[in-house]
């Protein structure tokens, strides 16, 4: 506390020396975003490294003794679930719905509720639970957790500002943090910006565009400086695309968009069913069952059913083995549903991309197209499936574009996103995140009512 107080005093003295009032105001407004972005980039790098080690360790164990997966998966699923329910219930799942709920609650009347969704404890539990989950073979991603952790960092930096500091919008701070988190997680700065505009905010971007752009740049540069200027997937060959593949793009977009929306509905239905559980052991049995099913998929069918799916995507995009069996999409989708509904921490972005890639790969096989055309269908499947889950076609297409640096197919990717978005609305007009956001807000208000102290009225006033 003494150190923090000393830092604040020195900062106040330093800024008091700045004569230009406008310059001082701009600097004071920007500094919290810069610091939070730098911290976000560092956390994203550490989390990325730990996540990769967890996946490598699981792969090593599975390849040396496949039967151990029947012990590893259930135990890890239960431990990941227990960490969440014991220490931070709002660290479960993706993290994006929590950020969306926090943005909605960031107003003068309900701002105190945001601390239930964003905080330092959530960062720790989010990392621990998701790492245990992926080590056990869970079909989860790290992008959603990174977004919630980034929102928590930006939230805390805002709270730690001294009273004399110029006021910064709490809502804009959280939104900017989420964009910076996605940019750092995937090395996709444009995707982070589009995500903030398309998914998170109803506010006109001009109100916080400078802060948003700066935060994305600093977080991204921090991650790049430590990890290198990498592409999440690499440079797939999409040259010499045939004119007839246009019809394949449409087919893949429709099927992947519908599949993404169906997967979302399954998750919501299972979560609703689980809400009827009255005893803790019922949740425990469900989590154990999910772990055993994931283990059975890997042991009896293929280990492609485990993990985030990044390795699978790189295989179908960069190896001659571009065609997948018809059951791979079913395994990837089922794995996502089982992993997400356990209640442990873990995102759905990367699993959704891999599910879409598997659909594109299967249809490429059925259509007997060239390797370049196959790659295009795989990329369009990724865009389509992610759009079916999130209903953000431009975010999905920009993300896949930045992950692969294939600008010559940007129009096909956008077309796939738009068609998938329309197709997914046949199943549900709202995204998975929209439904979960509403549920989180309801749960927080319910918890607040249950924990509130009852008001005792004096006997004579009744």
Image: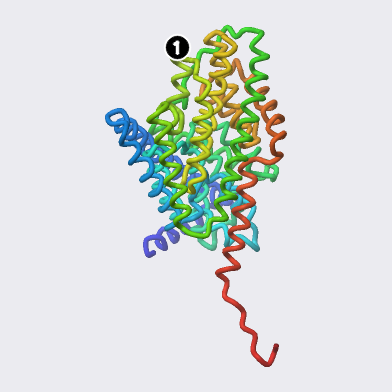
273 or 217: nearer the eye?
Answer: 273
Q: Is residue 186 left or right of residue 202?
A: left
Which residue is at a point 65% across and 85% down the rendered structure image?
Answer: 457
Quick one: which residue is furthest to the left in this view?
A: 64
Q: Is residue 11 left or right of residue 165?
A: left
Chosen colour scheme: rainbow
Residue highlighted by disc 1? 320
Quadrant assignment for the C terminus: bottom right
Query: Is 458 on the left or on the right of 7, as rendered?
Result: right
Q: Position of residue 257 (x, y in %)?
A: 64, 29
Instruction: Answer above or below: position of 248 versus 100.
Output: above
Q: Residue at x 70, y 29 (%)?
A: 423
Which sits in the foreground, 190 or 32?
190
Seen in the picture, residue 16 relative to 27 is either above or below; the reply is below
The residue drawn where x is 56% and y is 14% is: 364
- Is residue 408 visible to us here? yes
């Amino acid at each position: 506390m003494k150190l923090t107080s000393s830092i604040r005093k020195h900062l106040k003295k330093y800024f008091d020396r700045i004569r230009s009032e406008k310059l001082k105001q701009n600097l004071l407004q920007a500094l919290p975003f810069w610091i939070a972005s730098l911290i976000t980039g560092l956390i994203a790098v550490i989390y990325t490294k730990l996540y990769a080690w967890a996946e490598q360790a699981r792969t090593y164990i599975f390849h040396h003794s496949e039967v151990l997966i029947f012990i590893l998966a259930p135990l890890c699923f239960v431990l990941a679930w227990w960490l969440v329910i014991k220490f931070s219930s709002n660290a479960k799942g993706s993290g994006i719905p929590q950020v969306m709920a926090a943005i909605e609650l960031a107003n003068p009347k309900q701002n105190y509720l945001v601390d239930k969704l964003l905080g330092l404890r959530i960062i720790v539990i989010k990392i621990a639970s998701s790492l245990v989950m992926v080590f056990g073979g869970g079909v989860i991603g790290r992008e959603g957790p990174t977004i919630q952790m980034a929102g928590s960092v930006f939230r805390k930096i805002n709270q730690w500002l001294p009273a004399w500091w110029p006021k910064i919008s709490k809502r804009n701070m959280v939104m900017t943090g989420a964009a910076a988190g996605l940019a750092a997680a995937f090395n996709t700065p444009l995707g982070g910006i589009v995500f903030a505009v398309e998914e998170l905010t109803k506010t006109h971007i001009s109100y916080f565009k400078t802060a948003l752009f700066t935060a994305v740049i600093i977080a991204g540069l921090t991650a790049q400086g430590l990890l290198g200027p990498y592409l999440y997937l690499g440079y797939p060959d999409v040259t010499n695309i045939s004119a007839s593949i246009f019809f394949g793009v449409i087919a893949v977009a429709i099927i992947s968009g519908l599949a993404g929306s169906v997967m979302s509905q399954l998750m919501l239905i299972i979560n609703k069913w689980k809400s009827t559980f009255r005893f803790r052991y019922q949740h425990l049995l469900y989590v154990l069952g999910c772990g055993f099913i994931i283990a059975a998929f890997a042991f009896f069918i293929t280990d492609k059913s485990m993990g985030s799916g990044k390795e699978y995507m790189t295989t179908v995009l960069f190896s001659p083995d571009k065609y997948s069996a018809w059951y791979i999409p079913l395994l990837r989708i089922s794995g996502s549903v089982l992993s997400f509904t356990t209640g442990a921490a873990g995102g759905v972005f990367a699993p959704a991309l891999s599910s879409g890639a598997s659909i594109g790969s299967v249809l490429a096989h059925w259509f007997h197209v060239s390797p370049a055309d196959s790659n295009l269908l795989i990329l369009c499947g990724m865009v389509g499936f992610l759009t079916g889950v999130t209903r953000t076609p431009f975010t999905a297409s920009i993300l896949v574009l930045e992950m692969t640096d294939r600008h010559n197919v940007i129009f096909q990717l956008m077309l796939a996103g738009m068609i998938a978005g329309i197709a997914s609305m046949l199943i549900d007009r709202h995204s998975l995140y929209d439904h979960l956001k509403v549920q989180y807000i309801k749960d927080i208000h319910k918890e607040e009512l249950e924990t509130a102290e009852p008001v005792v009225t004096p006997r004579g006033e009744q």
